[in-house]
Amino acid sequence: MLNPNDLSSSTLFSALSEKELTDVAALMSKENYRKEELIFEQGEYGDRFYYVVSGEVRIWLQLPDGGSKELATLGAGQCFGELALLDDLPRSADVEVKQDCELWSLRREEFLVLLRGNAALAVKLLQVIGRRLRQADRHIQDLSAL
């Protein structure tokens, strides 16, 4: 099992107690990927959150003109795919392996079962999401003022 305390590095899970982190970690499964392997593509159905134990992934967008734009490179201790736990929408970017990776993933359906049985956990996650939305709003305001 993934060390539950490792999950606290994810913004989404940062407010959870040790027991809540343990409950989430118990639902996760280990996956290994090789360099240049595509984990998922923009537009495909997303149903998993990922935690990087080792290696690196590249998150990028394909642009309409045929080019691409790298959004981030993530390594050990970082997470991606949080939105897949919360909404039922397609992936917003592509994720490719830069260096062989060990990832732990959490499926949306299992996560939702956990939330349905734990209202306090659901409220904590809503608070975290609310803070992230406020930060995004402030960032948008700052950009619009330029």
Image (tube, helix red, strand yellow):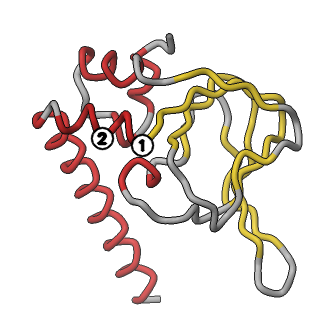
From this view, report whether residue 65 is shown above or below residue 13: below
Q: Nearer the viewer, residue 89 or 134?
A: 89
Residue wearing tag 1 = 108
Query: Do residues under tags 1 and 2 come within 8 Å of each other at their CB atoms?
Result: yes
Horizontal side of residue 113 vs 12, given as left or right = left
Q: Which residue is drawn at 30% across and 41% down?
A: 112
Please name the amino acid that badge 1 sits on. Arg
* Residue 93: x %, y % from top left: 65, 62
Q: Which residue is drawn at 74% across and 25% down?
A: 32
From this view, report whether residue 54 is shown above or below residue 94: above
* Residue 4: x %, y % from top left: 40, 16
The single residue placed furthest to the left in the displayed view is 119
Q: How many residues crowd around disc 1 within 10 Å: few (fewer than 14), some, or many (20 or more)? A: many
- As helix, strand or loop, the secondary structure at mark 1 comes to helix
Q: Nearer the viewer, residue 32 or 56?
A: 32
* Residue 127: x %, y % from top left: 19, 49
Q: Nearer the viewer, residue 121 or 113?
A: 113
Please name the amino acid that badge 2 sits on. Leu
Q: How many residues crowd around disc 2 within 10 Å: few (fewer than 14), some, or many (20 or more)? A: some
The quadrant in which residue 69 appears is bottom right
Between the C-alphas of marks 1 and 2, the distance is 6 Å
Which label was assigned to residue 38?
none
* Residue 141: x %, y % from top left: 35, 81
Horizontal side of residue 54 vs 36, given as left or right = left
Which label was assigned to residue 112?
2
- As helix, strand or loop, the secondary structure at mark 2 comes to helix
Q: Residue at x 23, y 58 (%)?
A: 130
Q: Nearer the viewer, residue 121 or 135?
A: 121
Q: Which residue is drawn at 44% across and 31% down?
A: 9
